[in-house]
Amino acid sequence: MGVPPSQDTRAQTGGEPQPTELVQDGITFRLHPVNGDLVAHLSSRPGSAEQVSSRLPPSVASAYRVRNGDTLRVIVWDRPELNNPGFSALTTSIVSIGGTESSSVPSATAGGNLDPVGRVVQPDGSIYFPYVGKVKVAGQTTDAIRIDLTNRLNKFVKDPQLDVTISSYRSQKVYVSGAVKAPGSLAVTDTPETVADVISGAGGYSEGADLAAATLNRGGQVFPLDLYAFFYNGDLSQNVLLKDGDVINVPERRLKKVFVLGEVTKPVSQVMPVGPFSLSEAIADAGGLNPLSANASQVYVFRQGPNRTVDVFQLDATSPGMLVLADQFPLQPRDVVFVDAAHVTRFYRVVSQILPFASSLYLGASAFK
């Protein structure tokens, strides 16, 4: 652009260095020299993991509450006629222990108390129980249901001994979508489900997953979820407890690209790997600077900013030590790395384009002599 970036990095308003600005075609370009002060300034900014953590919903464990569609198993001990239809009394079988001793243990006969068939909670949130009739169970815990049934049944059976468990969880689900091996839904059980549980239940994330850009959708509100910070940095704040209806989405990383153009050995459009990706890595993956045509002092990183602004970071790589500093400069998705051509290269290219045209003019003029 013909405008060198200012080397003055003294703090201005807000404690940030004031960049050189250039306006072209209604776009404001802000030029920053890549140096130790700039890298330190970028490193001092709050990390994305801290920003995400402050916005995540709180993890509060709560007891599982029965809803419509769940299946309850209600057993009244020593009263087989009160159990589910098809249930029979626990019979006693003799089990030989050591060939000499015997012990009586309960076992289930066909259709006995251990039959998996239970009582399905109806759409109105109730179940039917002998003598008691309809009992409202939706929204209650198994302990509350057991106490309620015991009090109701005590009018007909003296000191009933009840056991209430959930044999099938079908009313509450969480969902996983995106770059996981088995996207779909998982049932919410009495054991609180976390993000790690759901990702594991979906077979784990796929190779192209963008872990740092995962999201949690709860009640129509989307929360950013940094799974990279959780899996690789041990940030347990990202492993939140999930609720019914939560949706975990792990996007693909294919849109997180960095473009390396200009005087490099092999211009590339590269998908960013998992984790940080530095300017030195991007240049190295493109084969390095072209030793014959590149201007090492004119290595630029173009980064789109808000409101029609573009931040332009210039790296002077004439000194190999600056590449070490570039290794501390993190790239962001959609950054454009451009290596300008040397002045002699530009001159040669202009001459190579003019010479054929000039030669044709000379030969044409000579023909008419």
Image (spheres, grey):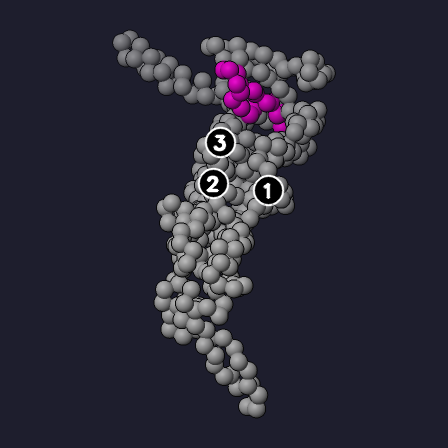
Residue extending farthest top: 369
Going from N to C along the chain, the mark reached first, 2 or 1, is 1
Q: Which one is nearer the viewer's eye here, 20 or 240?
A: 240
- Which residue is label 2 attached to? 246
In front of the other: 46 or 313: 46
Residue 60, label in figure: 1
Give the class, few, some or many, for how many residues have Cα within 10 Å of label 3's Cα (few <14, many ≥20): few
Dot 2 amino acid type? Asp
Residue at the spot x=62%, y=19% of the render? 32
Determine the CA span between mark 2 and mark 3: 10 Å
Q: Is residue 272 visible?
A: no
Q: Which mark is residue 221?
A: 3
* SS of the residue under disc 3: strand
| Frontmost residue, 298 versus 125 | 125
Q: Quadrant of the C terminus?
A: top left
Q: Which picture quadrant has residue 318?
A: top right
- Tell me the kind of residue under disc 3: Gln
Q: Is residue 316 within the magenta segment?
A: yes
Q: Residue at x 51, y 31 (%)?
A: 333
**Nearest to N terminus: mark 2 or mark 3:** 3
Q: Is residue 107 left or right of residue 331?
A: left
> What residue is shown at x 53% (from left), y 10% (from top)?
23
Q: Is residue 102 visible?
A: yes
Can residue 345 be found in the magenta stretch? no
Specify the segment rendered in magenta: 300-317
Q: Is residue 20 left or right of residue 305?
A: right
Residue 103, position as x, y percentages in the image = 55, 82
Q: Residue 237: give its label.
A: none
Asked whether the beta carbons under mark 2 and mark 3 sit within 8 Å of each other, the answer is no
> Which residue lies at the image location 61% right of the left edge and 35% below the top edge?
53
Element on which disc 1 rests: loop
Q: Residues within 10 Å of mark 2 (few under 14, many from 20)?
A: many
